[in-house]
Amino acid sequence: MYEMNIKFKNLLFGLFIGLLLGLWFGVNIGKGRSIVANPFAHQSFSQKVKSTVGASVERIGQEIKGQRDN
């Protein structure tokens, strides 16, 4: 009985830790950051603009390449 209680506590502890890590990683993946980054750190406005503009420029460049190939 005592051994079963310890196993149950270990299972709950493992599930709790897994839930916390899953939330941490999931938030970072959703925000497009590194998996181990701080999910609560706020990006400055200039960082958001740089990432958005960079992605847009790259997408436009690929569209222009596609137009040249046709």
Image (cartoon, grey):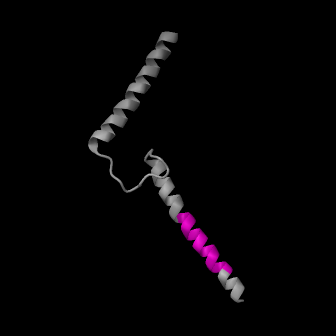
**Is residue 23 highlighted in magenta?**
no
Point 33% across, 35% down: residue: 50
Percent of width and height locating residue 59: 43, 26
| Residue that lies at the very extreme toward the bottom in this rendered image | 1
Query: What range of the chain is rendered magenta?
Result: 7-19
Which residue is at the front of the view, 42 or 65? 42
The answer to which of 36 and 58 lies nearer the viewer is 36
The reply to whether residue 65 is visible in this rendering is yes
Percent coordinates x, y for residue 46 in the rendering: 28, 39
Q: Residue at x 29, y 45 (%)?
A: 44
Residue 70 visible, this angle? no
Residue at the (72%, 89%) spot, across then down: 1
* Image mark count: 0
Task: Indicate whether 66 appears above or below 29.
Answer: above
The spot of residue 9 in percent (x, y) is: 62, 79
- Which residue corresponds to the image point at 45% horizontal and 44% vertical from the top-left? 32
Q: Dominant secondary structure of the magenta stretch?
A: helix
Q: Position of residue 27 (x, y in %)?
A: 46, 54
